[in-house]
Amino acid sequence: MTATDDLRSEHEGILRMLDILRAMAARISAGETVPPAQLKSILDFLKVFADKCHHGKEEDILFPALEEAGLPREGGPIGVMLHEHTLGRGHIRDMGTALETLPGAGQAGYAAFSAAALAYADLLTQHIAKENTVLFPMAERLLGVAALTDMHEPFERIEAERIGPGRHEAFHRLLDDLAAQYLAV
């Protein structure tokens, strides 16, 4: 499996979680209560899986390889992706702050979480589309299959170090459980 195949596969899980996040936000705006423990588990997924692991693979392995191949960091797609990673981290912080206020803030806390969650979901959906349709094809042209396949071991190392053994599978179980509850028609 190439690095871009791995990242695209992870995008599918992240997009699924963004759909769950949107469904939760819709319930919140309808006045329903969503269990704070579920919101915390989603925030954990976004912090650990999407940011530390997935974005870590991009920032520590793929982007430097693209720079070495001649793609500039500033003024091009790498700079845009890094900027959007930073914006996403801000939305994650805002969701975390809103979660901390939930016990006393009631519906206002849920509304603050929902606003940050929707902003994050919109940002990341567009971000993923750019990576899948622009950056990754560019990486495949510039780096080639062999170099992208050689990134598998460093990617595995990042995953082991940043999320730990068994967490990837646990995150996918969380996705399945929440999808059954929030995305079932």
Image: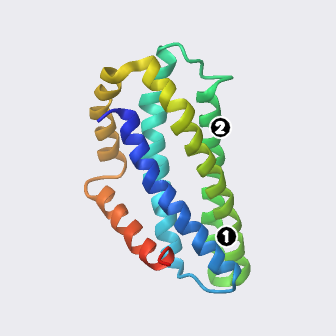
Corner quadrant of residue 169: bottom left
Image coordinates for residue 69, horizontal then vertical, percent = 47, 14
Q: Amino acid at mark 1?
A: Ser
Image coordinates for residue 122, horizontal then vertical, percent = 66, 55
Q: How is the image coloured?
A: rainbow
- Residue 142 vs 119, above or below: the answer is above
Q: Which mark is residue 114?
A: 1
Residue at 60%, 57% in the rendered image: 92
Residue at 33%, 45% in the rendered image: 159
Quadrant (top left/top right/bottom left/bottom right) for the N terminus: top left
Q: Is residue 157 visible from the viewing direction of this image?
A: yes
Task: Compare residues 123 and 5 and report the one nearer the observer.
Answer: 5
* C-alpha distance separating marks 2 and 1: 22 Å
Image coordinates for residue 161, horizontal then vertical, percent = 32, 45
Task: Compare residues 180 and 67 and report the one nearer the observer.
Answer: 180
Image coordinates for residue 112, horizontal then vertical, percent = 71, 70
Label 1: few (<14), some (14–19) or many (≥20) C-alpha neighbours in 10 Å:
many
Q: Which residue is mark 2?
A: 83
Residue at 65%, 33% in the rendered image: 80
Q: The residue tagged with tag 1: helix, strand or loop?
A: helix
